[in-house]
Amino acid sequence: MRLVRQTLALVAAATAAVVGLTATPAVAATIETGHLDVLDVDYVAGALTLDIRSYGPADDDLSPSGTTLRLPSSSAVAVPGGSAWNCLGAAGSTVYVAPQAENAGLIWAGWNTEDVPAAQGPVRMELVGVSSVPAGGRFAIYTTNAFGAPTFRLNSNSAAGCPTPVWPGNIGAGTHAHGNWAFSAPGTYTLSFRATAQGGTGVASPTVSYTFQVG
């Protein structure tokens, strides 16, 4: 079950009660376990949106604004040796990973275009920006095959041959999948993404920022 620490901001509700208005309290949540489609792309009434889809005990769409996704220090792993891993980091160095395979103690992060009609797909996914505190942190999404070899889907590493600001080959409509979400150092990361339908009228989502707390 997902562990969610929620802090309720009650000022808006209290003020609304005083003035006789109806208001919904703002909710700030930190999520550190459970099944999440972090890049949940929806197409509704001609518009494309990006949010977070959570699963169980009740499925819900969460706004990335006000939601922090946390990777604890227990997510730390060593970068494997071999040239295929160079764009993740130096062999033996530490990275913090939300893994492709489900781990009950960590978030299981994926992407979802099941609500994008085939006529609107595929979906171009862009990593618009990465900022971190401390500065210099790197982020990557990669998948591994049956032999453990990585394929980088998005990568902010600026080393030669590594930057991957656009998802290679796009994401097909009707997709639900998971990968490894890797961070190079502890800190707070702001990741900005944009999705664009490659079919239909080519509608694009707004650029949406997500917050990850690592370590």
Image (cartoon, rainbow, N blue to C red):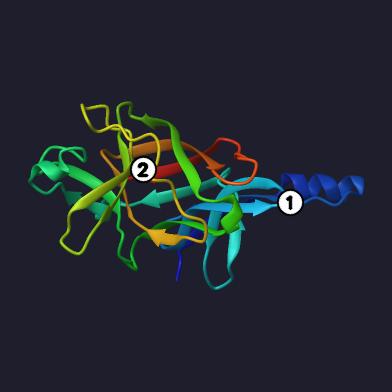
Mark identifier at residue 168: 2
Looking at the image, which residue is at 25% across and 49% down? 151
Looking at the image, which residue is at 33% across and 56% down? 179
The residue nearer to you, when weighing 50 against 47, is 47
Is residue 116 visible in the rendered image? The answer is no
Looking at the image, which residue is at 45% across and 64% down? 3
Few, some or many residues within 10 Å of mark 2 (<14, 14–19, 20+): some
Q: Is residue 76 left or right of residue 202?
A: left
Mark identifier at residue 45: 1
- Element class at badge 2: loop
The residue nearer to you, when weighing 118 against 35, is 118
Q: Residue furthest right?
A: 20
Q: Position of residue 93 (x, y in %)?
A: 13, 41
Q: Position of residue 155 (x, y in %)?
A: 32, 38
Mark 1 touches mark 2? (CB < 8 Å): no
What is the three-letter code of the residue carrying label 1? Answer: Ala
- Element class at badge 1: loop
Which quadrant of the figure contains the N terminus?
bottom left
In the picture, residue 165 is in which quadrant? top left
In the picture, residue 88 is in which quadrant? top left
The residue nearer to you, when weighing 158 against 138, is 158
Few, some or many residues within 10 Å of mark 1 (<14, 14–19, 20+): few
Is residue 154 visible in the rendered image? The answer is yes
Q: Earlier in the sequence, mark 1 or mark 2?
A: 1
Give the number of marks.
2
Q: Is residue 95 left or right of residue 193?
A: left
Q: Position of residue 161 (x, y in %)?
A: 22, 31
Q: Is residue 94 above or below residue 5?
A: above
Q: Is residue 86 left or right of residue 215?
A: left
The residue nearer to you, when weighing 179 against 94, is 179
What is the three-letter code of the residue carrying label 2? Answer: Pro
Cα–Cα span, label 1 and label 2 = 27 Å
